[in-house]
Structures are given as C-alpha cells and as structure tokens.
C-alpha cells in the first residue's frame, strides 16, 4: 500500500493505536511497507509506532494483517518435506535455557525434519542465534544455504532478519526500543519455510487463541500454541499447568492428551491444559530451568544433549522435543514421544547430532 506522504501516514497510524482504535488492512500494509522500503526513516517515528502497538489489545484480525504483510517480504526457503518449527515469542522474562532450540536438535536426531527460525537476543540474555554461534553451529544467510543445510542434516537454522526484508530493518529499531511489542508475537509466524507444523510458545495467555486462529488462516497443518503461567513461560512447562491450543488443519483431533479439556474453536482448534504430572514429571522451580549468557547456555545444552544430565532442564527438553515429534507425526501423543527422546539421549544420538551440526565428532 503506497501513500503520497508515508511518514505522515505512519504517524497517523501511531495516533490510531494511541487512541486504541482498530487498524484496517490498509493501515497495517502501509506501515509495514513504509518501514521495509524507506531509506530515510525517522528513528523517533518508528520507535513511537513500535511502542504504540502496546497501547491497545490487538485482535486476531489485526494480527493476521500484520503477518500477511510481513510474509510478503520473506526470502522463501522451499523444501519438499513436511517441516516442523519450534519457536517462542520470547519476552517472558524467565531467563530459562534455550528450550526450543535444544528441543529442535533433540527431535532432529530422531529424524524429524526441522527448519528452526532463530534470532539474536532482544529481550533476553541469550537468543537462539547467540546460542548457536557459541555452539559453532552455522546459522545460514541465504535460502540456498538453508536448503543445502536442510538436505544434508535434516535441520536448518534460519536467522530471522536474514530471511525477511522487513524484519531486517525492524529488528534494529526493536533492539533500540528494548521492550516487548506486537512484533514479539509476530516473529514466529514469519519462518521463511512457512512450516506445516509449529510448536509455538507465547509469552501471553490471552494471545494464544488469536495466534492459533492466525495459523489456521495461514494454512498451517498442525500446531501447539502454548503458554504456562506461574511463572509465565513460553514453553510447555514443568513449573505449573500449561495452556495448549492445538490446531489440526484437517479439523479432527488426532492425538491423545492427558489433562483438562477447555473447549474448541471452530472445530479445528482444541484448548486444553496439561500439568507436569500428566507426563510423569515432577514440578520444579523456575530457578531450576534458568541459564545465563550464551557461553553458559551452550555449556548446559551440551550437558543435556550428552544424556548425562539428569535434571529438570533435561526433563523439559524431553517434554518439548516430544511435542515436536508429535506434531511431525513421529508419535501418536506427546506422552509416547518422551521415551523416544530419552533413548536418543542415552544412546548418544542427540550428542552425535549436536556434534555433526557443529562439524565435529563425539
């Protein structure tokens, strides 16, 4: 969407957000296009726009406008396999280890096809890209490199700003702003492979159903959109119950869950809650899952994937990697996947996978 005076239009859209007025599709497209394509951006205007997205509750419709507008700027990664991603919105301020990234490596060791979207730290001390760099695992820069890595390893790590022209510009301003915005929730939805299945952690419970609806509208085949409260974690948690919105694009619930059924949205999205005990795990404190900087988180990742660390950190990787296997059709339920991942750790499959990705040997 092009305007005669795009800077004024961006400021008008910011004003609408400040007045808590709903945005239409033209508003969103205009803002995204302007930020992505303009070489003479006024920093304060962009920062004001980003900050203003926190001023109102964003609807599922507005969320869809943002995602579809951002996806236009994707540098696509196209493969022929059924692809799964695990990515969180971040900004839960929990300071946990990089659960989704370590889980992706563990699940990949069992043959799950993964294209994992990554990003550098914006609201945490160690983003997924930071962890991978510390582990000496390549984070690819082009679609060709991504496809090559995927074909060779069954998994590829794509750094979000390298694969989306809007994110490339916008992340600079997000980092300067230094706090959560609507774009935390949008990041996992612009994976350049447009994955068929996603384990998507959300740092806000009220956003989960909206994101599940957007995924359905985007054509995602399977998804678990998850959030845990007390404390707030954008993963399937061992500290408390986790709310799960499960999307089945075919409209039929495929798996078995243990927990409390909460309802359904349009027959294709089921809402339920699960507890650590439903999967045979003990509850833990958030401190038991917390890491540190990239060096510390890399050390912990190596310990977990070596199969020699028996701790809540290992257990939460077992749980979330199993959820990925379930989404990718490698098992019929999350519960069924747990012993598969555990055996992969004991047999050193996960350690070997980590070493091969880093170009070394065990």
Image (tube, rainbow, N blue to C red):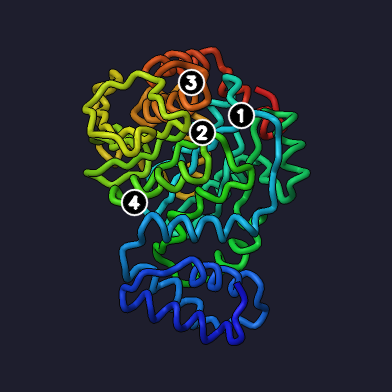
The residue beneath circle 4 is: 207
Q: Quadrant of the N terminus?
A: bottom right
Query: Is tag 2's residue or tag 3's residue first in the polypeptide sequence?
Result: 2
First in sequence, mark 1 or 4: give its number.
1
- Binning the other alpha carbons within 10 Å of mark 3 as few (below 14), some (14 to 19) or many (20 upward) gives some
Identify residue for label 2: 221
Q: Nearer the viewer, mark 3 or mark 1?
A: 1
Q: Which image quadrant for residue 170?
A: bottom right
Q: Secondary structure at mark 4?
A: helix
The mark nearer the N terminus, 4 or 2, is: 4
Nearest the camera: 165 or 215?
Answer: 215
Q: Position of residue 340 (x, y in %)?
A: 47, 14
Find the distance from the CA under tag 2 to the CA under tag 3.
32 Å
Kindly report the distance in space between the C-alpha atoms of the residues bearing marks 4 and 2.
20 Å
Q: Check if mark 1's residue and mark 2's residue have beta carbons within 8 Å.
A: yes
**Label 1 crowding class (10 Å Cα cut-off): few <14, some 14-19, many 20+?**
some
Question: Where is residue 175 drawn, in percent x and y?
Answer: 50, 67
């Amino acid at each position: 969407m092009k305007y005669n005076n795009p800077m004024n239009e961006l400021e008008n859209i910011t004003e609408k957000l400040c007045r808590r007025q709903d945005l239409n599709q033209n508003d969103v497209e205009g803002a995204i296009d302007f930020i992505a394509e303009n070489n003479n951006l006024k920093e304060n205007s962009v920062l004001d726009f980003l900050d203003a997205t926190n001023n109102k509750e964003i609807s599922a419709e507005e969320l869809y406008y943002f995602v579809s507008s951002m996806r236009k700027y994707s540098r696509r990664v196209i493969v022929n396999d059924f692809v799964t991603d695990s990515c969180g919105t971040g900004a839960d301020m929990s300071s946990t280890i990089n659960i989704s990234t370590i889980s992706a490596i563990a699940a990949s060791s069992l043959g799950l096809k993964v294209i994992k979207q990554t990003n550098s730290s914006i609201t945490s001390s160690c983003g997924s890209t930071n962890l991978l760099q510390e582990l000496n695992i390549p984070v690819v820069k082009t679609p060709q490199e991504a496809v090559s890595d995927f074909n060779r390893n069954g998994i590829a790590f794509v750094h979000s700003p390298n694969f989306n022209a809007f994110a490339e510009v916008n992340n600079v301003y997000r980092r300067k702003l230094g706090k959560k915005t609507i774009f935390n929730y949008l990041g996992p939805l612009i994976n350049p492979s447009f994955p068929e299945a996603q384990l998507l952690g959300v740092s806000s419970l009220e956003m989960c159903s909206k994101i599940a609806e957007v995924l359905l509208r985007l054509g995602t085949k399977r998804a678990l959109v998850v959030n845990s409260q007390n404390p707030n974690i954008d993963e399937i948690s061992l500290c408390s119950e986790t709310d799960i919105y499960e999307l089945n694009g075919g409209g039929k619930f495929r798996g078995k869950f243990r927990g409390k059924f909460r309802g359904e949205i349009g027959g294709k999205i089921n809402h339920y809650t699960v507890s650590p005990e439903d999967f045979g795990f003990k509850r833990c404190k958030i401190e038991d899952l917390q890491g540190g900087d990239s060096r510390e988180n890399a050390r912990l990742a190596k310990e977990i994937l070596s199969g020699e660390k028996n701790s809540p950190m290992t257990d939460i990787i077992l749980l979330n990697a199993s959820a990925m296997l379930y989404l990718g059709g490698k098992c019929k339920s999350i519960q069924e996947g747990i012993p598969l991942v555990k055996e992969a750790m004991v047999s050193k499959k996960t350690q070997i996978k980590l070493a091969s990705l880093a170009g070394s040997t065990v």
